[in-house]
Image (cartoon, rainbow, N blue to C red):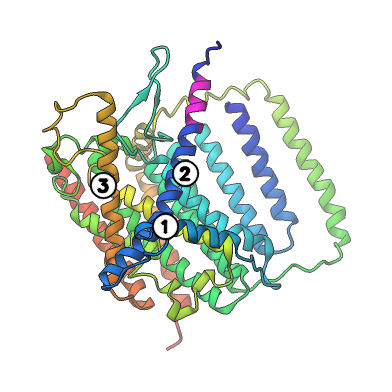
Amino acid sequence: MSHLTNFEVFLLLSVVKVAVVLVITLTCVAYTVLLERKVIGHMQNRWGPSRVGPFGLLQPLADGLKLFLKEDLMPLAVERPLFILAPMIALACALISVSMVPFGAVTRVSLHGTPGVDLFQVADVNIALLVILGITSIGVYGIALSGWSSNNKYSLLGSLRSTAQVISYELALGLSLVGVVLRAGSLNLRTIVDSQTHGIGPLGWNFFGGFQFVAFFIYLMAAYAETNRSPFDLPEAETELVAGYHTEYSSMKFAMFFMAEYANMITVSCVATLLFFGGASSLFGHFFDGFLNTPVFNAVFSILWFVVKVFAFLFLYIWVRSTLPRFRYDQLMSFGWKFLLPLAMANIVITSLVLALRS
Amino acid sequence: MQLALFLIFGALAVAGALNLLFQRHPINSALSLVVVMMSLAVLYWSLGAEFLAAAQVIVYSGAIMVLFVFVIMLLNAGVEERTQGSRAAYAVGIPGAAALFCLLSFVFLSERGALGTSSVGGDLSNAADNIAQISQMLFTKLLLPFEVTSVLILVAILGAVVLARKEQ
């Protein structure tokens, strides 16, 4: 019976965590697609997919199988290395951000009395928020290269529009998060979550008690533009540009773009709950702390709260998609630069003024 | 661990830089430069400069290189054509490169004692201190260069807007 050193335990647990988070994220992506189709269907007074399995629950399986088995077309004139690389960059960047999200309370698996490995966060990085912003910036290459390497007018136009949109709204996105960072005093996601547990339940959250509601709405709108979702989805609107930057892609590569889009949605929802809505903390605050106070129940309930909040944000994404019409491209760009950016800067000024006057 | 990170990402940066020189299509060169920038970010991180690494990725790889890639895509720069290397370039270039190499090796070997003793992540402890220290410096000791640099960037933006405007 051999004993493992601390480093080996850390390595083993990290590999297990990565595998679990990956599987769960990809399953969530598949079922978010189903959720979207069902919710939009019900909002349009029709059933969504309901044939494949009870309530259409096996639809993602059928979709996955179809995409996997489809013929993988590659037109002759495409720039092959970049054509193949672009969806990989998009998917990789979408999945890397999920690794820094703490999706539960701090639950350590300790060995020989060392501080141990935190079960509910894959990578505890001190500058996690900056890394997430950086990964979003790198994800732009997936879109830009896919459109250009397709050797197709529609794809190029779609990808250039999408790239310009993404890099414009990245600024508003980053600036809207500065208010939260000022309040928490750190870029570490755990620290930001912990700084929101000091109030009475929801009043401690950054949205309510932290008065960051303006920042929250800027973040939400900028994030909708970043993930190319309605009402900012002109680059991939079928009625406008055939299918934009993923026109020439089929089967697995298209599936990768699709997965990347929904994984980005999930990342955005996770970051929104962590930064503005208290992350894994309960809605009732510390009221029910004495009730069922065992480590296992605490861990399970914290994950449950996190999942409920992320689900609410995904529902909001889908709800907005089925309700609002699209922005025109020039309206979209002027909104990002002339409205959101000055508003985000004003939010930073006011937040720092209030914090400076208070201390 | 530190040494392994340095070797892998240092080698990746050098390979990216060499690939940039040897690729014939400008977009492949631009993407190799992105690889170089990101390897440099990893090297900064391994030395403890976390904020600088993140800034390198966000600003350099994520904005400046996107601009490069945009320009190459829009201007439809094609594959570089093969030309005869000029004799003068060979005559001056190879001895010049050899001289530079000898000079650098001489400097590094003579200062051998001082090298290789970097405290890994020792000076800058954690990210909060990291950002706090940088901002302390920027807003107290280096305030004038900071403000002058902002004005410089503003002048560049205004110049770009004026140059790109349509004739009226």
Tag on residue A308? 3
Q: Which residue is mark 2?
A: A23
* N-term-proximal mark, 1 vs 2: 2
Where does residue B62 sit, x and y in percent of width and height? 49, 55
A266 sits to left or right of A140: left
A204 sits to left or right of A70: left
Q: CA distance from mark 1 to mark 2?
A: 14 Å
A116 sits to left or right of A289: right
Q: CA distance from mark 1 to mark 3?
A: 17 Å
Q: Which residues are magenta?
A: A7-15
* N-term-proximal mark, 1 vs 3: 1
| Element on which disc 1 rests | helix
The crowding category of the residue bearing disc 3, from other C-alpha atoms within 10 Å (few below 14, some 14 to 19, many at least 20), is some
Where does residue A255 sit, x and y in percent of width and height? 52, 60
Query: Residue at (53%, 16%) from the top-left corner?
Result: A4
Image-quadrant location for residue B39: top right
Query: Residue at (38%, 38%) from the top-left corner?
Result: B134
B134 sits to left or right of A291: right
Q: Which residue is mark 1?
A: A262
* Residue A323 showing in the rendered view: yes
Of A63 and A123, nearer the camera is: A63
Name the image quarter holding the C terminus of chain A. top left
Does residue A70 sit above or below B150 in this rendering? Answer: below
Image-quadrant location for residue B1: top right
Q: CA distance from mark 3 to mark 2?
A: 19 Å
| Element on which disc 3 rests | helix
Query: Residue flagged by tag 1: what amino acid is it?
Result: Tyr
Does residue B20 sit above or below A128 in this rendering? Answer: below
Does residue B9 sit above or below A44 in this rendering? Answer: above
Q: Tell how many labels.
A: 3
| Element on which disc 2 rests | helix
Query: Residue flagged by tag 3: what amino acid is it?
Result: Val
